[in-house]
Image: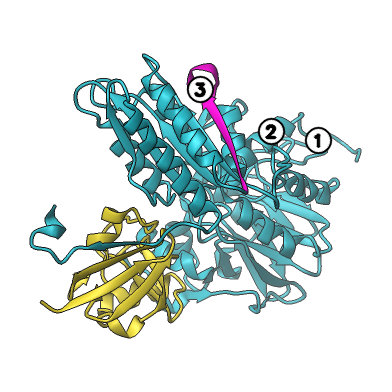
Amino acid sequence: MSGPAMTVMPGVPVEIAPDVHWVGALDPDLRQFDIILRTANGTSYNAYAVRGVDGVAVIDTVKAEFAEDFFARLWSCCRPSEIRAIVLNHLEPDHTGALPELLRLAPQAKVYLSFPALKMLKGLVKNGLDESRIAVVDEDTRVDLGGRTLRFVHTPYLHWPDTQCTWVEEDGILFSGDVFGCHFCDARLFNDRVGDFRFSFDYYYQHIMRPFREHVLNALALIEPLPVRLIAPAHGPVLRDAPTSYVRRYRQFAEPVLANEAAGRDRTLLVFYISAYGNTARMAQAVREGAEEVDGVRVSLYDLAGGDPGPFVDLVEEADALVFGSPTINGDAVKPVWDLLSSLTMVRVKGKLGGAFGSYGWSGEAVGLIEDRLRGLKLRVPRPGVKVKLIPTDEELSACAVLGRELAEHLVGRATPRHIDFTAPQALSA
Amino acid sequence: MPKAQVTFEDIGVTVTVPAGTRLIEVSEKVGAGITYGCREGECGTCMMKIVSGIEHLGSPSMLEDQVLKENYAGAANRLACQAQVIGGHVIVRPG
């Protein structure tokens, strides 16, 4: 798309479609967002004003420090008394910082949000929240602005439980919240005018959306049928040129990074270990051999000393069971194990099977700490781990093999049910 | 001592416990996949699915009821940090 160069000016809204204005704010100097994201090009907080015959809807606001910019642009395209609707697609503070003031200045406006957002709103606007002004929306809700109708697309967990998109059917505009967004600040605003932001778009997906892949797929099933002509996300460029190509990019992202040739045939069990004197390595080998006794399970063994977390995370995303072996050093599992475990928030691991083992010299905390972490990541840990003092005996290696075999049996639904009686005296406090 | 049985379906473990035991008291001990956040019935993290035997759990408190509603809970959902098993046999799984 060609045309005259245009940049965002202070206090001036930018028309992105007839009577639809960008009224957000630019934050070019930001270099780190929410602790977890690096932002080489800063970011933008995108808010929008949609005018109908009967009034104006404001879609999201901005981070509190940028409220002045937001209101300057907003009052340049409407009066406070014209605002009928305030739509909150996502309540994270970078989108709701100006909300309390907007509620005060437009007391007639009604707030439209998803059901999970309601609880969060009460945490954000603690005093004086008039609940009669709040409307919880679903896919059947219509907000008629007069010639323009807002509908809502339920897209939970992209990337908070509250997230939704707002769809203006007459114009084919999708106000997508953080979906299809990125941290890339460029005053030329539109995707066909700004610099190359592809890396930011991809990076944003990998760090924000990837852990919610199944929810991405659910959202795409709702979004792909829409005749989208423009996507207006809450961060980064407004996507007016080939907007559906960004939807297709999400579809590509949501495919597994690694093609799993065993999928549908075998379940996959990964054993990660690291070893100081070869003892935990021998235990890892025994776990592997035990697991391999079970038909229908593909077992793989990886020495963490020889790899980085990134590629292992891709493996983990497609695996069914994860077993970690670590020696105990200074009362803890060792750093390469924690490096991988802390990276697993990048992908969905909930519901996978987990287990732990390790050799130790004095105290042996590593196994319990790894199991706690696995449970914290919402893995199932059906069998207690194996701890061995220093050099494993044949009997102790057999216990490792049993751990591997039992985890593998769980994977294929052949685990032997266990019964534990906690009614013996003192049993619950044991 | 009145007793009850709870089966954690996701890990294939059945426990016999004194009647009145809260699920939170045993699920972590046996490694079940139910995970906890606040442990006080406010966050909803430990919502579980009752596969059978829901009648053997004590009635939810007003607080638990409210949190279940806020989390789109179905009729077979309870919070593991709140639910007490009062007898019989209850089968649960995360979710």
Q: Spatial distance from mark 3 to mark 2, Cα to Cα?
A: 44 Å
Residue under label 1, please give it: A193
Q: Colour of chain B?
A: yellow
Are the residues flagged by discs 1 and 3 from a single subunit?
yes
Categorize mark 1 by other alpha carbons within 10 Å: few (<14), some (14-19), many (20+). many
The amino acid type found where label 3 is placed reads Asp
Name which of mark 3 and mark 2 comes first in the sequence. Answer: 2
Q: Quick check: can you spot residue A365?
A: yes
Residue A246 left/right relative to A101: right
The local secondary structure at tag 1 comes to loop
The amino acid type found where label 2 is placed reads Asp
Residue drawn where x is 70% and y is 37% of the image? A258
Residue under label 2, please give it: A186
Q: Chain of mark 3?
A: A
Q: Quadrant of residue A328?
A: top left
Name which of mark 1 and mark 2 comes first in the sequence. Answer: 2
- Position above or below: A149 against A257: below
Q: Magenta region: which residues?
A: A296-308
Q: Quadrant of the N terminus of chain A?
A: top right
- Position above or below: A305 against A153: above
Residue under label 3, please give it: A303
Q: Chain of mark 1?
A: A
